[in-house]
């Protein structure tokens, strides 16, 4: 079943804020094999001028999975067959570093739906803001739904 | 001072099934194709493959190491060109990461890096670029 192009422009706000924790940042940094003190040690982070430990550049990936059930790929109206999805591309624009203690709100927006040969591609942008409403990051991710050969 | 054409120190990273399990837990990406051979092959993959975002994160280590400050990364983008199969052994897949400085903007105080990531000589990412504050 093709993806319904009517979902382009549709917004999917996360139902709750996401609170960035030291322990989650630590788990993520260790899992990607990057145990830098700035990611792990609040004293080092404060010394460097940050409020708390800094998250690695791709940390906000966790938002996509935390709120996957609330996003367009899980929306029956979009008609995405998740079993045939592969990650096409990914972009992070970081307006400022993410640090532990950040309370982040996010909204996923469908930017584009298009056919690529036998496959389809859906591009989703996630706008992340902090508790003050200030932009923190913009994530753009495309999922390719492989066509049935 | 960064100059256009400067090469980043190449890094070879081994990716094992244990790394994928750790990343699944830390990221929340529990897709079975990243840990279950039976399901991965059933959907037409060569076997269990690494999370694209795991590969992106590992390549990102070269960027943060070059920048010196991991908070200096302003933008980072990749296209996933080829899956990274991770065999069920203690050796795993060998990811070779490299890069060079593509552009320097002294007024903005930024540098753009172009990055490469290969497994068995074949590129697994295309259009991989990062912009960092210098």
Image: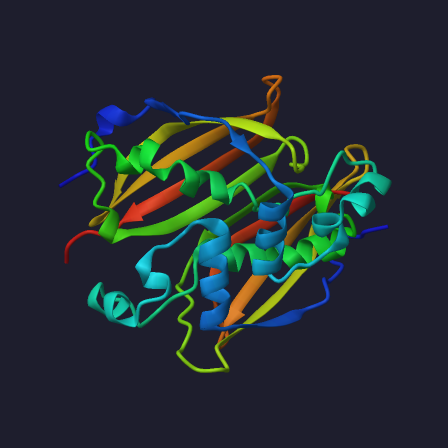
Task: Out of B101 and B69, give the one closest to the viewer.
Answer: B69
x and y, in percent, of residue A37 in the image: 76, 53
Residue B31, position in %: x, y? 34, 55
Q: Is residue A107 above or below residue B37?
A: above
**Quadrant assignment, res A47:** top right
Which residue sits furthest top?
A132
Image-based side of B57 in relation to B42, left or right: right
Identify whether A82 is placed above or below B96.
above
Q: Quadrant of the C terminus of chain B?
A: top right
Q: Could you tell me which residue is drawn at 55 percent across and 28 percent down?
A: A104
Looking at this view, is A80 or B25 the one in front? B25
Q: Is residue A33 left or right of residue B64?
A: left
User: Nearest the camera: A132 or A147?
Assistant: A132
Looking at this view, is A84 or B118 the one in front?
A84
Picture coordinates of residue A132, whole percent (x, y): 62, 17
**Residue A124 position by quadrant:** top left
- State the image coordinates of residue B133 (x, y, percent, origin top left): 75, 41
Say which residue appears at 53% left-offset and 28% top-offset. A128
């Amino acid at each position: 079943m093709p993806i319904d192009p009517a979902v382009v422009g549709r917004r999917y706000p996360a139902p709750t804020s996401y609170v960035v924790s030291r322990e989650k940042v630590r788990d993520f940094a260790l899992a990607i094999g990057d145990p830098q003190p700035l990611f792990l040690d609040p004293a080092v982070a404060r010394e460097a001028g940050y409020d708390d430990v800094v998250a690695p550049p791709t940390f906000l990936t966790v938002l996509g999975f935390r709120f996957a059930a609330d996003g367009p790929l899980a929306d029956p109206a979009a008609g995405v067959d998740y079993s045939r999805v592969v990650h096409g591309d990914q972009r992070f624009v970081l307006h400022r570093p993410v640090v532990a203690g950040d309370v982040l709100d996010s909204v996923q927006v469908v930017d584009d739906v298009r056919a690529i040969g036998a496959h389809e591609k859906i591009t989703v942008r996630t706008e992340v803001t902090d508790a003050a409403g200030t932009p923190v990051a913009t994530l753009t991710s495309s999922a390719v739904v492989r066509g049935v050969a | 001072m960064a100059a256009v054409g400067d090469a980043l120190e190449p890094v070879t990273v081994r990716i094992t099934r244990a790394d994928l399990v750790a990343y699944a837990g830390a990221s929340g990406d529990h897709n079975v194709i990243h840990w279950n051979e039976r399901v991965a092959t059933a959907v037409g993959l060569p076997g269990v493959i690494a999370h694209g975002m795991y590969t992106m994160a590992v390549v990102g280590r070269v960027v943060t190491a070059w920048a010196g400050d991991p908070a200096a990364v302003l933008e980072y983008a990749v296209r996933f060109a080829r899956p990274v199969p991770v065999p069920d052994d203690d050796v795993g897949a060998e990811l070779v990461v490299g890069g060079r400085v593509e552009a320097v903007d002294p007024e903005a105080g930024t540098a753009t890096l172009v990055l490469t990531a290969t497994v068995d000589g074949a590129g697994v990412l295309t259009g991989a670029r990062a912009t960092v504050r210098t």
